Amino acid sequence: MGKPLKQYVAISGSTGFVGKNLLKFLIQKKLKCIPVLRSDLQEGELPPSKCSCFIHLVGTGNEIEDESFEKVNVEITRKAIDICKKSKIKKIIYFSGLGVSSKSTSKYFISKFKAERLIIKSGLDYTIFRPSYIIGNDDYLTRNLKKQIKKKKIVIPGTGNYIIQPISIKDACNVVHLAINSINFSKKIIDLVGPEKITFKQFLKNSTNNSNIEIEKIPSKKSIVYSSSHKKFPYSIEDLNILFGNFEGNHDKLRNISKIEFTKIRNI
Ligand SMILES: NC(=O)c1ccc[n+]([C@@H]2O[C@H](COP(=O)([O-])OP(=O)(O)OC[C@H]3O[C@@H](n4cnc5c(N)ncnc54)[C@H](OP(=O)(O)O)[C@@H]3O)[C@@H](O)[C@H]2O)c1
């Protein structure tokens, strides 16, 4: 019997935090990963390949002049779908955000919701993940906290009593790997959340190892004002929308579908 054929997957956003980790993980699992470049996305075309799945990780949570939420989160998703159709890739896996819904009012959430709708209506097979904070080496939240710790002061916007449900990057990669082939993930929207809910305040305390870092609470309304008026304020308006949204995900659904043992927060 000959060697089994390698499975090919296309990955956009492979230079980002999730993309880098996922690329490494899937290569270890003996998959052939084809990074989808910015130029491929612009042209809406991929060089010929035999990909069976497109993992679409391009996204931004930070709107800047030429890179609006609409352009990056919605229009590039449209291009990703075009590429799937042209290249006969039958399945797309997308990273949206925990809390995204038809009732979302923030620009970031609205753009993610629009992208979800494009995918659902595309006719492709899909898995849409809605992640909470994904934690690993050099992730977005830890990077932010490390910067604050360096200055010996951490800011808690509002009460800090709102919930987050972090998931380890290793578990996230594991789940995506399963979703590439398993029918259980087919045409589903799944919260990508860890097994424990923790208040943001407690998460920060754990991250400082209870050392002598000053913790300053700034009332929510003031934080919202500071997010746009104080350049050095550590949270953007979209960060605050996510935190104050107090979104809780359905971990049981994820565990039942994936059947993996998830990492507890203290072990991430
Ligand atoms: N990490 C989390 O905790 C988390 C939580 C919820 C949702 N998500 C979603 O998960 C996805 C991956 O997250 P991440 O943490 O890996 O994000 P990231 O580190 O910011 O990476 C974003 C990726 O998107 C690419 N990108 C941005 N703008 C682009 C554009 N205009 N054209 C083409 N590529 C562009 C970046 O390419 P360059 O390197 O070239 O800039 C990078 O590869 C994103 O959609 C994010 O919204 C992440």
Image: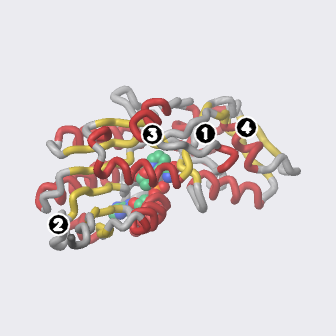
In this rendering, does residue 206 appear at all? yes
Horizontal placement of 84 versus 136: left or right? left
Dot 1, how many residues are within 10 Å of its Cα: few (below 14), some (14-19), or many (20+)? few
Residue 249 rendering spot, x and y as whole percentages: 49, 31
Q: Residue at x 22, y 42 (%)?
A: 118
Q: Give 165 or 76, whichever is nearer the viewer.
A: 165
Q: From the image, state whether disc 4 or disc 3 is nearer to you.
A: 3
- Look at the image and tell me in which quarter the N terminus lies: bottom left
Give, as a three-letter code, the residue at label 2: Glu
Residue 196 rendering spot, x and y as whole percentages: 61, 35
Q: Would the CB of label 2 be found within 8 Å of ligand 1?
A: no
Horizontal placement of 90 versus 186: left or right? left
Q: Would the CB of label 1 be found within 8 Å of ligand 1?
A: no
Mark number, residue 240: none
Disc nearer the start of the sequence (4/2): 2
Secondary structure type for disc 3: loop
Disc nearer the start of the sequence (3/2): 2
Q: Which residue is mark 2?
A: 45
Q: From the image, state whether disc 4 or disc 1 is nearer to you.
A: 4
Secondary structure type for disc 2: loop
Q: From the image, state whether disc 3 or disc 2 is nearer to you.
A: 3
Give, as a three-letter code, the residue at label 4: Gln
Disc nearer the start of the sequence (4/1): 4
Label 1–label 2 contact, CB within 8 A: no
Q: Which residue is mark 3?
A: 259
Q: Which residue is mark 4?
A: 202
Mark number, residue 225: 1
Considering only vertical position in the picture, is 250 above or below 148? above
